[in-house]
Image (cartoon, rainbow, N blue to C red):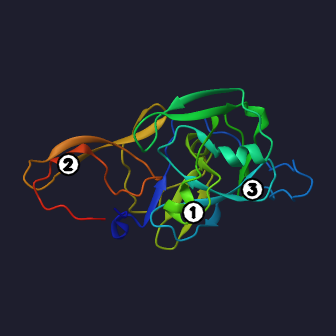
Amino acid sequence: MRRMREKRSLIWLALVSSLAYLSTATARQVDSGNAPDPPPRLPVLVPFPECGSTVLLPVRVNGRKPRLFILDSGANSIALDQGFADSIGLRPTGSGAGTGAGAGPVPYRRYPRDSVEFAVAGVSFRSDHTISVDLSNQPGILGFSVAGVLGTDFFRLVTVEIDYDARFVRLHDPARFSPPAGAETIPLTFEHEVPHVTARLTVPGLPARTRRLLVDSGSEDAVDDSLVLESRGPLHRT
């Protein structure tokens, strides 16, 4: 189900304003064969390709050529594709299993903070929660090769403005960002470091119910809740 763009064409994600802001830094040249990004002067505009409601941003990993990452407010880690992580010589220090969009556990590998540096439009950072998972199915789903997922630690660093219609992301300094006139503030709660919002949902044949929903910019669904399955209205293939 595609995101309802007429109502959500322009949003701001200041998801972790209650947490300490991380300082921005110049991306350092780790691979001598690739020039580093220049120091960021926020705000900075980053275009993204047409990919439904999925936002794909170019990210440098350890100074290498930019690769596309999914911008995902519903992810509490920074995830790399396992094949990509192996190709750049990263060595995991542990492994585990978590949950993902599908059924069943998702195996992952962990990497130490000092072994991986990320840079998005010159905004450089490291993460205490860098893992790798198998993203080899993403070209068949999105039509793009995806090298990773930008989750919680990126949203700690910057305020993210997304314009779905114009297909760009603008990164703001959280300390200097002011919402434009007419913008609405929506209260968020956090569980496992990812944001949730309380909403009233109505489906055909049932009274409205209050639900707690994950704010998930990495999902193609406008609303994903079990209440939809209880609808007594006709089902539509999407």
Closest to the observer, 188 or 71: 71
Name the residue tied to disc 3: 122
Q: Residues within 10 Å of mark 1 (few under 14, many from 20)?
A: many
Is any part of residue 1 visible from this angle? yes
Residue 136: % across, % down: 59, 52
Residue 202: % across, % down: 16, 52
Question: Left or right: 78 with respect to 236?
Answer: right
Q: Is residue 6 above or below residue 196?
A: below
Residue 142: % across, % down: 51, 62
Mark 2: which secondary structure? helix
**Residue at x-position 37% and y-position 64%:** 2
Name the residue tied to disc 1: 169
Name the residue tied to disc 2: 229
Q: Residues within 10 Å of mark 3 (few under 14, many from 20)?
A: many
Of the residues under marks 3 and 2, which one precedes in the sequence? 3
Residue 203: % across, % down: 15, 53
Closest to the observer, 32 or 91: 91
Question: Left or right: 224 with respect to 35?
Answer: left
Residue type, mark 2 in image: Leu
Residue type, mark 3 in image: Gly
Which residue is the extreme one toward the right? 32
Of the residues under marks 1 and 2, which one precedes in the sequence? 1
